[in-house]
Image (cartoon, rainbow, N blue to C red):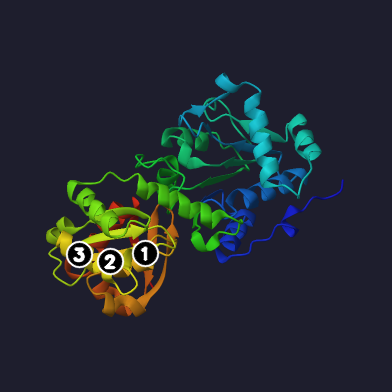
Amino acid sequence: MEKLDLLTKIRPVTSGQQKLMQSLLDKTKEIVGVFGPTGTGKSLLVSAYAISKVFNEEYERFVLCRPLVDVVTKKELSTAELGTQFVEIAKQYLLDILSGYVEVSLIDKMLEEGKLVIADPHYLRGRTFDNAIIFLDDAQNIPPESAGELLMRVGTNSKFVIAGDPVLQKDIPLERDGATVLREALLGEENAVVIDLGLKDMVRPGAKRGARILLEIRMRKRSLSDSERSLLNIVRAHAPDADVLTVVDIRDLKERYAIHTEIPDMLAISKSGFLGRLIGRKGEKISKIEEEANVKLRALELGLDFKPLLLAVHPLRLKIERGIKEVDLAGPSVLVRISERVAGPFFGPRGTHIRFIDEVFRRVLDIGVRVEIE
């Protein structure tokens, strides 16, 4: 039989993707968890790996388990509602991912021969998957208990891969989604590896724009306090042509953490490309807004670089700026990598600075912050 090796055609192009592929090929890793925003190649690399290995008879089955969610009602659908359409939707999903790499006939043949199994996460109890690659995709849309149930179905000589986006594609009110909980459960687990992909790993055309729009929608939907609503009205009066997504009052956080340095009282965040209209050609608009509102205001532009927000609100900006190596999404958090020489001022006395920063990011983006020291 002719061999199929999709992995020679679909190659990892970022360091994060390379780590994912190495972990998939490492037979000592029984469980691989990969978490990150859409467009980072999670589903493409895992599906290509699984189809190649099953087609070449290194495993007997590729079990795809992916929750189907109605994006309008947020309801998770099952085979009870969809019947055979459940399999058709999952099959089309695979074909969309692997477009240009596999033919419909190959997917159909693997389904007919039982080498490709579409598993409904609602009906897993009592099933066991031996000598298989089990792929739970979009884990953020599945309850943690269902994800744990799938883990119990993994049999001998099998590899379990979990992928999810615990930041941009999860339901915002849901604090403990399946992807977040599974990631935590896998950390330090024997024969398991966790890989966090970030915005730097986005390779799909349009993915970064989509991520920015999702963050923009999140900001537009923020519930405003009375003080924030009042400031927004003032901003719109002085800068009517600036598309301001939200304003954020952080005065209570400054008081709670005894922050006395010259950082802003409130933030005004504009859509990308509108910052100049908010500030004014010589800063006259922002000055008038500050004067009328009687607050120290910092105007920022929404983007996928979170470093400007970090620097805008860190109490010791000048001391830590050069020590920041990277600011990116990682798992359910914004990961800030810093050099050891700035760790003291970055964290602050008794960790007050990092706790303050974490709360500001949660208030602005609904995403917490964690730090790694290099």
The residue positioned 27% from the left and 75% from the top of the image is: 317
The residue positioned 12% from the left and 60% from the top of the image is: 255
Q: Nearer the viewer, residue 22 or 139?
A: 139
Which residue lies under the disc numbered 2?
Answer: 285
Around disc 2, counting alpha carbons within 10 Å, would you say few (fewer than 14), some (14 to 19), or many (20 or more)? some
Amino acid at dot 1: Arg
Which mark, residue 290?
Answer: 3
Q: Earlier in the sequence, mark 1 or mark 3?
A: 1
Across and down, in percent, residue 114 comes to 73, 31
**Which residue appears farthest toward the right when viewing the image?**
1
Across and down, in percent, residue 197 comes to 51, 58
Q: Earlier in the sequence, mark 2 or mark 3?
A: 2
What whole-number distance in Å separates the C-alpha atoms at marks 2 and 1? 8 Å
Q: Nearest to the eye among marks 2 and 3: give it.
A: 2
State the image quarter where residue 257 is shown. bottom left
* Image position of 194 (left or right of 113): left
The correct choice, above or below, for 203 with respect to 137 in the image is below
Give yes or no for contact between labels 1 and 3 (Cβ–Cβ under 8 Å).
no
* Image position of 18 (left or right of 309): right
State the image quarter where residue 250 is shown. bottom left
Amino acid at dot 3: Glu
The correct choice, above or below, for 367 with respect to 81 in the image is below
The correct choice, above or below, for 20 with respect to 218 in the image is below
The residue positioned 82% from the left and 50% from the top of the image is: 3
Which residue lies under the disc numbered 1?
Answer: 277
What whole-number distance in Å separates the C-alpha atoms at marks 2 and 3? 9 Å
Element on which disc 1 rests: helix
Which mark, residue 195?
Answer: none
Element on which disc 3 rests: helix
Across and down, in percent, residue 345 comes to 24, 75
Amino acid at dot 2: Lys
Give yes or no for contact between labels 2 and 1 (Cβ–Cβ under 8 Å).
yes
